[in-house]
Amino acid sequence: MDLKEIQNLIKFVAKSGASEVKLETGDVKITIKTGSDDKETTIVQQVPMGGHQMPQQMPAQQPQQQQTPTQQESAAPQKESKDSGDDDSKYITVKSPIIGTFYRKPSPDKPTFAEVGDTIKEGDVLCIIEAMKLFNEIESEVSGTIVKVLVDDSSPVEFDQPLFLVDPS
């Protein structure tokens, strides 16, 4: 099982809402647990002693402790927008499929993937979320215009946290 297949499995488990998945193929054993109170994902891989050396347990994300202020910051704009009327109800919310650090640019010297007012189509890259030293491109599942960016650059995000508002019209 290669890294890409493991990443796809993690994404699938995150979207499915399952709390635990165990997979054994040949000499690889993977357990993915989600849905704890801490909203963290634990991945455990075990390889027989004769195989190449891999850590038996990969640590969960370090930024977990910093997420509380971010939740408060991201909740504040949502409350303000709800107070201003039901205008946001016609927009589609693009949510984070994984836990990690949100980046709007591919690198510090490059332009952002998507700005407010940009027209996007299905499959366009909107941002990158770094999880466990892996940079995952988050692609749009809808076409439309970016109305609002709900997360600050380089800030931690949780699973299913709103990232963008898109006007599908």
Image (tube, grey):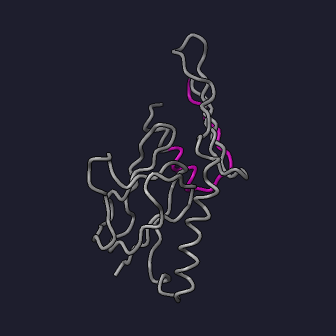
In this picture, residue 17 sits left or right of residue 125: right
Question: Would you place residue 139 above or below residue 49 in this image?
Answer: below
Residue span colored magenta: 9-26
The residue at the point 54 percent across, 55 percent down is 157
Which quadrant of the figure contains the C terminus?
bottom left
In this picture, residue 72 sits left or right of residue 150: right
- Foreground residue among 98 and 118: 118
Question: Would you place residue 57 above or below residue 115 in this image?
Answer: above
Question: Would you place residue 167 above or below residue 159 in this image?
Answer: below
The residue at the point 47 percent across, 63 percent down is 163
The residue at the point 59 percent across, 40 percent down is 62
| Residue 37 in the image, given as x and y percentages of width and height | 73, 52
| Residue 159 in the image, given as x and y percentages of width and height | 57, 56
Tell whether position 96 is magenta.
Answer: no
Q: Residue furthest right?
A: 37
The residue at the point 43 percent across, 72 percent down is 165
Question: Would you place residue 30 above or below residue 144 in this image?
Answer: above
Q: What is the quadrant of residue 90 in the picture?
A: bottom left
